[in-house]
Amino acid sequence: MGYAIGTYDLPKEETKKDIINSVRTQILQFNDPTYMYKLQMQLAIQEERYDDAGTLRDKIESILASNREFGLVVAMETALNDERYE
């Protein structure tokens, strides 16, 4: 019993534009679990409720630390902003 050796097309190397479009598509599909906390924190700061703002900041940091998917999205955004496409 032999195996046929075939030719396979290797995936093309992604261009910078392909990478940017792919990452942006993924980011648009992601639901940011910190969005409402960020808005509430901004409001608390405007209203000079700094204790509340600190509590909200801590919640955001906790989500960032525990949500792996969110961490990856942040890393992708940062890489795009820094023009690191590796």
Image (tube, grey):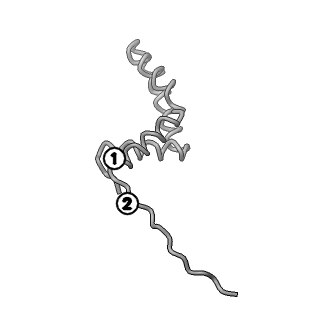
Tell me the quadrant of the picture where the N terminus can be found.
Answer: bottom right
Q: Secondary structure at mark 2?
A: loop
Tell me the quadrant of the picture where the C terminus can be found.
Answer: bottom left
* Neighbourhood count class around disc 2 (C-alpha, 10 Å): few under 14, some 14–19, many 20 upward: few
Between 53 and 36, the one nearer to me in the picture: 36
Horizontal side, residue 58 vs residue 83: left or right:
right
x, y percentage for residue 39? 46, 21
Kind of residue at badge 1: Lys
x, y percentage for residue 83? 29, 48
Residue at the top extreme, as displayed: 47
Q: Secondary structure at mark 1?
A: helix
Residue at the right extreme, as displayed: 1
- Taking the spot 50% from the left edge, 70% from the top edge, the residue there is 8
User: Which residue is disc 2 drawn over?
Assistant: 13
- Taking the spot 38% from the left edge, 55% from the top edge, the residue there is 14
Label 2, label 1: how many angstroms apart (C-alpha)?
Answer: 11 Å
Depicted 49 relative to depicted 33: above or below: above
x, y percentage for residue 61? 48, 37
Horizontal side, residue 76 vs residue 67: left or right:
left
- Taking the spot 45% from the left edge, 62% from the top edge, the residue there is 11
x, y percentage for residue 85? 34, 53
Between 56 and 21, the one nearer to me in the picture: 21
- Taking the spot 51% from the left edge, 41% from the top edge, the residue there is 70
Horizontal side, residue 45 vs residue 1: left or right:
left
User: Which residue is disc 1 drawn over?
Assistant: 17
Between 69 and 5, the one nearer to me in the picture: 5
Kind of residue at badge 2: Glu
